[in-house]
Amino acid sequence: MSLARAVWCHMIHRPSPSQKSHFPSTRSKSPFPKIIPPFVAGQFLCKLRDLIMASDSPKDLPVRPAEDAKAKNAPPADTLPQWLIERNELFEKLWQQHLEETKNRPHPEINVTLDIGDGNPSSVPAKAYETTPGSFLRDVPKDVSANVVIAKVNGELWDLNRPLEGDCAVLLLPFSNNEAREVFWHSSAHALGEACECEFGCLLSHGPPTPQGFFYDMAMPDGRVVREADWKPLDNRAGKIFKEKQSFDRLEVSKENLKKMFAYSKYKLHYIDKLVTGEKSTVYRCGTLVDLCRGPHIQNTGKIKAFKIMQNSSAYFLGDQSNDSLQRIRGVAFPDKAKMQEHLKFLEEAEKRNHLRIGKEQELFFFDEVSPGCAFLLPNGTKIFNALQSLLRSEYRKRGYQEVQTPNMYDVGIWKTSGHWAHYKDDMFKLDVEKREWALKPMNCPGHFVMFGHRERSYRELPLRIADFGTLHRNEASGALSGLTRVRRFQQDDCHVFCEQSQIMSEIEGLFDFLQSIYGLFGFQFKLQLSTKPDSSLGSQETWDEAEDQLKKAMTKFKGDDWTIDEGGGAFYGPKIDITIADALKREFQCATIQLDYQAPLNFGLEYMTHEQVEKTEKPEKAEKAEKAEKAVKTEETEKKKETKPIDPGPGRARPVVIHRAIIGSFERFLGILIEHFGGKWPFWISPRQILIVPVMPAVNDYVEELQQILQGDKLNVDIDISGNTMQKKIRRGQLEFYNFILVVGAQEKESRSVNVRNRDDPSSQKHGTMVPLDELRAKLKSLRKERRLVNAL
Ligand SMILES: [Zn+2]
Ligand SMILES: [Zn+2]
């Protein structure tokens, strides 16, 4: 869900008869209740650190210390704040008008086909502005209807309670569908928000679904913090909300009325200003909550059968540390209790694999507030990084890539030429040097374009494949930083292929083979999705058709029909293929992308001599070309020329197609994914702790040291333990630290120049290892590393 849609989401409600009595007609003196104070400077550093270390795993999220348990000014549970009462009264007034208008509308019969999810649509009787998708549930088998969360009407998500407006195709979606689950969690966030407003009298800010559930951010009265002791009353309140089966009432409201309705909250007013671009937007009511929200939602809160508050923390409004510090409450909910149990089990497993925890235990990396969002890679983490990099380098050599290095900072002119300045300026780190404006690169592409254009190019050089491990910086908001998954400084296995239009298919085939060989090493399954030409795009229909055709052929050759298509989902400058990998817990990540680009060669004036031209003039006019390349980086001039720059560079010359591609993407993020995928049990070739040597008695310590020398000479990561601890204790430590192999040596081993091997992944070897002659061991370890085998076996 986009941020825009996510923030949208939240609320009022039609009071039940019993609640009506809570709506006195007195007016509050000020429409602005006191809100949380901005963050105090002294708390800044520790706060920042909390945020940096945060991940979406609930236990890692920052938790501010609890304040005095005597809550300040919390409203008695049965009293609703005045602003809430006024907001809801306005909603109710507009709601009655809406009902009146709907009633007076004609309700003509419409043609509706209904698909209950089995792919067999049938015609059903329906009337416009009367029949709702939810009304069809009465005639659907119980086992199906019980699972339905939301409808899709002509491909658009649609509330089950929202009347149909014309001829349409209706599809019912169960919780197992990703979009439906998002709607379910999004709706659950409303219920949480409602409970929070009632319990705390707080001002809600933003409450989106997340991959793990949902949260709601709020400003508590007088800056009080949420405590774990608050969870139980919230849980109880939520339980009542579910029992009441509160419906979600959708209402379109004019911007003017929205401002009146939410005048009490600067947070909601911010969203109204920023996100309501038309004359009106929608507001939803469930229970006592009325929220600004685009919807849609589940039919009623009674669908939520299992609900749990997972965590509370603080978070800055809009993730920006210069804004108010808010309280964030995270929860998760399911349509049945079994699913909740399953989820809690999954979280337990995920927590065991948490990359921040393992990163600390294995001394791989750390973060420090001296440079938020930029990881310090310790020696062990660097060993993994280097193993990955040398893997890629060896593939580059095999596959005809050339590694280059490009500058880290550029005059902003280049970013204007590339288009980043217009769309990405705020996400870049900017510098002023000698009165010129510079920026740190957030991606390598423009540097590579300059490199391509710096001299005359011939068709003979194509495809030209340029690889770069350059350091990139992106100015992520401090609140958005999260472990290794969201950082400010990172390196990528970034490549750009410059090729002829006719070479696209073979390049893509080569990339698929590359992908397969890399992901296969880690045991990742992966999926492909092609995004095609959007409505407005650069280049002719013919060029796009041809490019898409080549991509489709390559995908079919590689994966048969096992790939999906997102029609119209490509960027305006070219079609792309997204590659999603699934880890050991079946969580999906997107690391790789393959993006075709017809715009960049145009912006940077990239061209090459075609076959015909090379034959005509073997000697290119170097001076003229060098001048052209220089022009590409001269901002304003280029900006002006852009409008007039011809798409066709003239006879005998052509523009290359650029393919942007990364396979592992950010090394930092990939390291995080690998830690969690392997749970810290590294395959031998990438392991920072390959071998631990333990003596049976001090008398063989010299042999232990000699072995370490020999194996280190084989470029293996070898530790020894000749401390005063018992042998059992040393072995136990080695097992807990996931050494791939523990070599135990005594007098017998020393005598026979052999070792006793215990294999981390072979339980039968743990008590009594296997005796292996040293030379044989060395040969086997070397081949295990060279072949980069996934299975830890000699
Ligand atoms: Zn909503
Ligand atoms: Zn690129």
Image: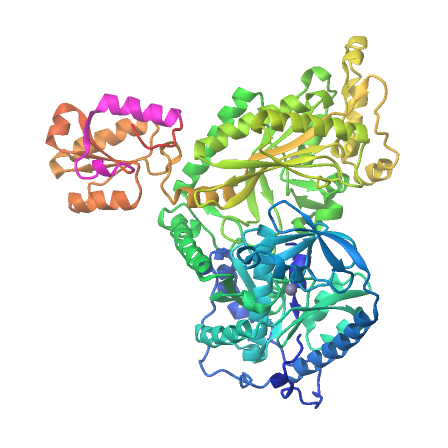
Q: Quadrant of the N terminus?
A: bottom right
- Give the image's coloring scheme: rainbow
Question: Who is closer to the viewer here, 109 or 381?
Answer: 109
Which image quadrant is residue 621 in?
Answer: top right
Note whether residue 335 is visible: yes
Q: Position of residue 147 (x, y in %)?
A: 55, 57
The residue located at (43%, 49%) in the rendering is 355
> Where's ligand 1: which quadrant?
bottom right
Quick check: is 495 in the magenta stretch? no
Q: Is residue 387 visible?
A: no
State yes or no: residue 782 in magenta.
yes
Give the left or right position of residue 103, taking residue 229 as reference. right
Residue 103 location, quadrant = bottom right
Q: Is residue 239 above or below residue 331?
A: below
> Viewed as shown, does residue 404 lie left or right of 125?
left
Quarter of the image containing the C terminus? top left
Residue 311 lies, in percent from the top left, at 47, 65
Residue at (62% x, 39% y) in the render: 408
Per the rendered image, the range of residues in magenta is 761-787
Q: How many marks?
A: 0
- Decide which of 674, 576 is in the foreground and name it: 576
Toward the viewer: 432 or 196? Answer: 196
Q: Nearer the viewer, residue 43 or 509?
A: 509
- Residue 632, compared with residue 138, is above or below; it is above
Is 767 left, or right, of 569 in this rendering?
left
Q: Of all residues shown, which one is farthest toward the right?
A: 644
Residue 231: give x, y in percent of width and height: 46, 73
Task: Say which quarter of the image contains residue 632.
Answer: top right
Percent across and percent down for residue 98 are 78, 72
Residue at (80, 12) in percent of width and height: 612
